[in-house]
Image (spheres, rainbow, N blue to C red):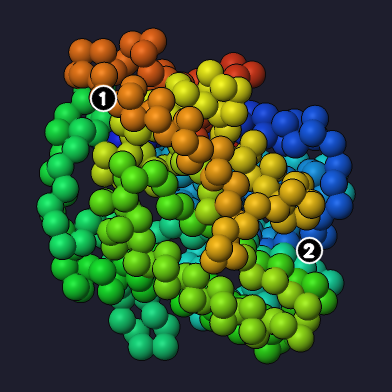
Amino acid sequence: MKVEMKLKGNMARSVNPYGCKQEVLNQINYVKAEGDYEGPKKVLVLGASSSYGLASRITAAFGSHADTIGVSFERGPKDESMLGTAGWYNNIFFREFAEQEGLIAKNFIGDAFSLEMKEEVIKYIKESFGGKVDMLVYSLAAPKRTDYKTGITYSSALKPIGQEVSGENINLEKEELFTQVVEPATEEEIEGTVKVMGGEDWEWWIELLKEADCLAEGFKTVLYSYIGPKVTHAFYHDGSLGVAKEQAEESSKRINENIRELNGQSLICVSKAVTTKASVVIPILPKYLICLYKVMKEQGIHETPIMHKDRIFRTMLYGNEANYDEKGRLRPDSWELSDDVQRKVNDLMAQLTPQNFKSDLTEYQLFKKEFFNLNGFEVEGNTINEVDFETLKAMKP
């Protein structure tokens, strides 16, 4: 059966499993080419199946030779019209490549927010993973979260606060630039976004791991955040998601107190804008991305998720080039937010029209290709575009 890219708006409705395999291998090869570094050895990644979470897992495993546990919510193949999610196959092929190197690569598929998943992971750490982890990466992006202490389910909403925001966005399916109006978030939506995208669940993970004596001396944990430039603040940093990220910063402070006796460290890492399944559906952001990529590529500093996270791990989290701001946040996004880059991006955005946004004026084609790569399509090195359903069905994460 031949597989082809299918889109609905800015969401993929198909997957090429073997393209996913090649994309994972391409990221592994990038890390290997950068050489080894002294980093973590026992790593737990929450949200491990794609983008920043997967990149973190790959750099830890193939740059620092770390054993890893990945937790993610993914779906396997159901029938020939529903082959599962890209993350399902990323997990499978990451495990295969890691095990070929003699590394432990355990995948847990399910709800990372649940108490059951936390208990299952802790049991595995104690019985089969050496008893302790020295690094936890929190990279969850989800639309909903059920608070297991109350049973209440919350939903996130990426909306501005106190104002309606209008701007131009990109529809990948129709390949058009259109005007989008985003209504302000309600108080309920703000609360829900904080519950889903804030740091409460991160704190609960750390508390339970510590209570179970599963945190190593010198333990580190990091949550990935994004601030972005002023042009995106109304619907992002100053919106409901920004409130959630501010709450995560408070969580980080409490985590630092909790792990002080272990000489541990909790960090908020403010990452740069990259192409992810989440970023392409954030209102208005894709227009900014195609201009940002053009400017950063011309300056030789454009980064994909694996390039960005590998740099962070080897030079900042476990290196001597950490760049902190006044709030103690790690700021590898400084390349993106430099005055020179932002000035050129703003100038470029002002020139865009529905007629020219796909031209060489921007990096629309790169943005589109990176999105396709997330789903296993147009991946460099992959030549397999046909699959056998029964073979896929037999694959286990």
Which residue reaches farthest top? 360
Point 25% across, 20% down: residue: 352
Residue 234 place in picture, x, y as percent: 26, 51
**Front position in the image: 157 or 144:** 157
Q: Is residue 94 above or below residue 359?
A: below
Q: Which residue is mark 2?
A: 42
Tell me where residue 180 sits by quadrant.
top left
**Front position in the image: 12 or 256:** 256
**Front position in the image: 101 or 204:** 204
Mark 1 burial class by Cα count in 10 Å: few <14, some 14-19, many 20+: few
Point 15% across, 42% down: residue: 166
Q: Is residue 188 visible?
A: yes
Q: Secondary structure at mark 2?
A: strand
Q: Is residue 395 above or below residue 123?
A: above
Residue 27 place in picture, x, y as percent: 67, 34
Q: Which residue is mark 1?
A: 350
Mark 1 and mark 2: Cα distance apart in space: 47 Å
Q: Is residue 201 above or below residue 91?
A: below
The residue mark sitting in front, 1 or 2, is 1
Q: Which amino acid type is shown beneath numbered disc 1?
A: Ala
Question: Which callout, 1 or 2, points at the residue further toward the start of the chain?
Answer: 2
Count of numbered tags: 2
Point 69% across, 81% down: residue: 259
Q: The N terminus is located in which quarter?
A: top left
Q: Which amino acid type is shown beneath numbered disc 2?
A: Lys
Residue 347 place in picture, x, y as percent: 33, 24
Q: Secondary structure at mark 1?
A: helix
